Amino acid sequence: MILALKRLFAYWLDFVILAICLTTPQWIIYVITSGFPFSKFNTGIEIGLWVIFTISIPVWIYFILFEHLKQQTIGKRILKLVVTNEEGCNISIKQAFIRTFIRLLPWELTHIIILIPEPWWSIKEPKNSFLLYIPNFIMLLFIVILMSNKGVKGLHDYITNTRVTINTSETL
């Protein structure tokens, strides 16, 4: 159970770090330019593309590269966790990509649901709000699977033949 909680906390830490690193430049641009480019966005697709290029792609790159090259993200490093293949070695770039795709699926679905076809804040009553049950159900499923095996494997680990363990080596 401790491993599962450490994994969830590491994931949360990674997103706090990423949010600070990725939204700070957006905020600075917004302040310096009096709202540009945000004031030019008129559709959900435009906002969606902005989110993809300034948030989603950097987040994907972060998880894929850190887990493939270093066996851990910053959150995992802080909590002394490592991701490995079944033999205990670095995961392949393909495994890192698939892990990231599965893990971020609820997040990306939420972006699509809220932004496309029209951003929710631009309309009085969203017609597709019930669709948010889908990413929330997926996240709940992820947590149930993670907790059911005391944190050793999440759904993305089962699919990619990876695992997360406590780092007993100081060399990583």
Image: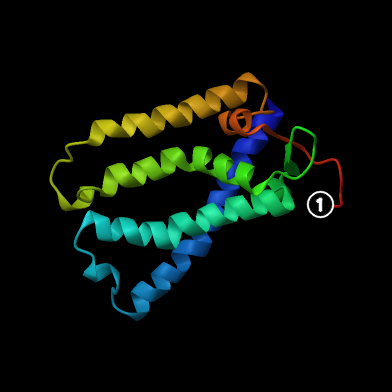
Q: Position of residue 137 (x, y in %)?
A: 41, 27
- Residue positioned 14% across, 41% down in the render: 125
Circle 1 Cα neighbour tier, 10 Å, few/some/many (<14 / 14–19 / ≥20): few
Q: Position of residue 64 (x, y in %)?
A: 60, 51
- Residue positioned 36% across, 80% down in the render: 32
Q: Secondary structure at mark 1?
A: loop
Name of the residue lying farthest toward the bottom: 32
Q: Is residue 73 visible?
A: no
- Residue positioned 42% across, 43% down in the render: 107
Judging depth in this view, the residue of 111 and 2 nearest the camera is: 111
Please indicate whether residue 69 sits to the left or right of residue 137 in the image.
Answer: right
- Residue positioned 51% across, 37% down in the render: 102
| Quadrant of the frame with the N terminus | top right
Q: Which colouring convention does the figure follow?
A: rainbow
Give the mark count: 1
Please indicate whether residue 39 sits to the left or right of residue 29 in the image.
Answer: left
Judging depth in this view, the residue of 152 and 157 nearest the camera is: 157
The three-letter amino acid code for the residue at tag 1 is Leu
Q: Position of residue 133 (x, y in %)?
A: 33, 29
Q: Which residue is mark 1?
A: 172
Residue 14 position (above or below residue 3): below
Please indicate whether residue 101 sits to the left or right of residue 79 in the image.
Answer: left
Q: Is residue 57 visible?
A: yes
Q: Quadrant of residue 114?
A: top left
Residue 67 position (above or below residue 164): below
Residue 40 position (above or below residue 97): below
Name of the residue lying farthest toward the left: 124
